[in-house]
Image (cartoon, rainbow, N blue to C red):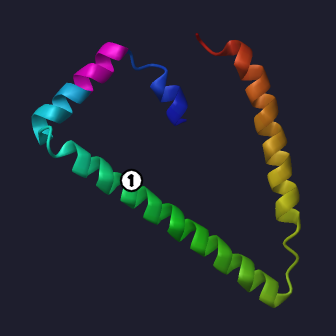
Amino acid sequence: MFSTIILFISGAEIFFIMFIVVMVFGADKIPDIAKGLGKGMRQLRDATDDIKQEIQKSAEKQGIDTSFTNDIRNEIDKVKESVDDVSGVVKRK
């Protein structure tokens, strides 16, 4: 979804947004803001991975067969590849 939103923002609009950000926060605060956002995204990813591992361990402990998740992931990857093949022709240059 995010990639489709990016397609509708032109260079002038990105420049205007960056100008407003610099005016509001100041040039010296932008690297700190970006660093904080990066740390937050990393923590969210780590927490998500931890939750996935706990669910996997719990399922294995209960004797639940989780091998079907690999099959689902493989099918999802196949669908993504086919969509990429089709959308490659449609994408703007």
Q: Is residue 86 left or right of residue 39?
A: right
- What amino acid is found at the position of numbered circle 1 in the picture? Gly
Q: Which residues are magenta?
A: 11-17
Whether the magenta-drawn stretch holds residue 33 is answered as no
Toward which corner of the image does residue 30 lie, by quadrant?
A: top left
On the image, the x and y values in percent for residue 9 come to: 40, 20
Residue at disc 1, secondary structure = helix
SS majority, magenta: helix
| Residue 7 vs residue 29, the one in the foreground | 29
* Percent coordinates x, y for residue 62 in the rendering: 81, 89
Q: Residue at x 23, y 21 (%)?
A: 16
Q: Is residue 58 above or below residue 85?
A: below
Give the answer, above or below, for where 36 lies relative to 84.
below
Q: Position of residue 39 (x, y in %)?
A: 38, 59
Residue furthest top in the image: 93
**Toward which corner of the image does residue 20 lie, by quadrant?**
top left
Name the residue that disc number 1 marks: 38
Q: Is residue 13 magenta?
A: yes
Residue drawn at x 77%, y 21% as measured from the top left: 86
Q: Is 49 left, or right, of 42 in this rendering?
A: right
> What residue is at 59 percent from the left and 12 percent from the top?
92
Taking 60 as reference, is 3 left or right?
left
Depth check: give the residue in front, 45 or 90: 45
* Residue at image location 81% in from the left, 83% down from the top: 60
Pick the quarter of the image with the N terminus: top right
